[in-house]
């Protein structure tokens, strides 16, 4: 094998091992409101560890399931996270100037009432209409 090929292969191996991105853990689950799967919404995870700067997020699918992403990659860094959930009614084009109305209690978007530990055995989120 030529020295050029060996050198190039070695360089590729070194560069592949020097990723500055933290390893991510797969995080997926289901969101329910009063026991019924939510059909839309967004989830933001806020780390309790100030050294974790990335903010994992997820879209709630029509069946209530979600898969967390971090900077476009599937998964979340390990740690403890506060969870914020938002979900709004679809905007009526005739009332485009009206602010969207939340379909879940605003407390879930304003304060991290829920929490997730990554890794964990269960990532399902149960929301309730009543305080």
Image (cartoon, helix red, strand yellow):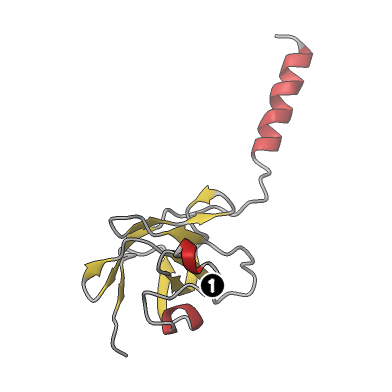
Q: How many marks?
A: 1
Residue 86 at what x, y percent from top left? 45, 71
Q: Residue 31 falls in which quadrant of the image? A: bottom left
Residue corresponding to mark 1:
46
Q: Residue at x 43, y 84 (%)?
A: 107
Closest to the observer: 119 or 89?
89
Split into 4 quadrants, where in the image is the C terminus?
Answer: bottom left
Q: Residue at x 53, y 61 (%)?
A: 56
Q: Residue at x 42, y 53 (%)?
A: 26
Residue 90 at what x, y percent from top left? 42, 64
The answer to whether residue 14 is above or below residue 64 is: above
The answer to whether residue 20 is above or below residue 107 is: above
Residue 50 at what x, y percent from top left? 63, 75
Closest to the observer: 123 or 72?
72
Split into 4 quadrants, where in the image is the N terminus?
Answer: top right
Left-right relation of 91 to 125: right
The answer to whether residue 20 is above or below residue 17 is: below
Left-right relation of 114 to 70: left
Q: Residue at x 47, y 80 (%)?
A: 112
For the residue labelled by badge 1, is the local secondary structure a helix, a strand or a loop?
A: strand
């Amino acid at each position: 094998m030529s020295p050029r090929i060996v050198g190039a292969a070695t360089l590729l191996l070194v560069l592949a091992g020097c990723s500055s991105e933290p390893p991510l853990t797969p995080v997926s689950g289901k969101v329910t409101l009063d026991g019924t799967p939510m059909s839309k919404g967004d989830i933001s995870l806020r780390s309790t560890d100030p050294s974790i700067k990335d903010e994992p997020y997820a879209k709630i699918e029509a069946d209530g399931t979600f898969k967390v992403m971090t900077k476009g990659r599937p998964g979340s860094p390990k740690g403890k996270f506060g969870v914020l959930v938002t979900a709004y009614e679809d905007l009526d084009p005739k009332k485009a100037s009206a602010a969207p109305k939340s379909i879940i209690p605003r407390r879930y978007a304003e304060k991290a009432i829920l929490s997730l530990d990554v890794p964990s055995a269960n990532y399902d989120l149960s929301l309730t209409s009543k305080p």
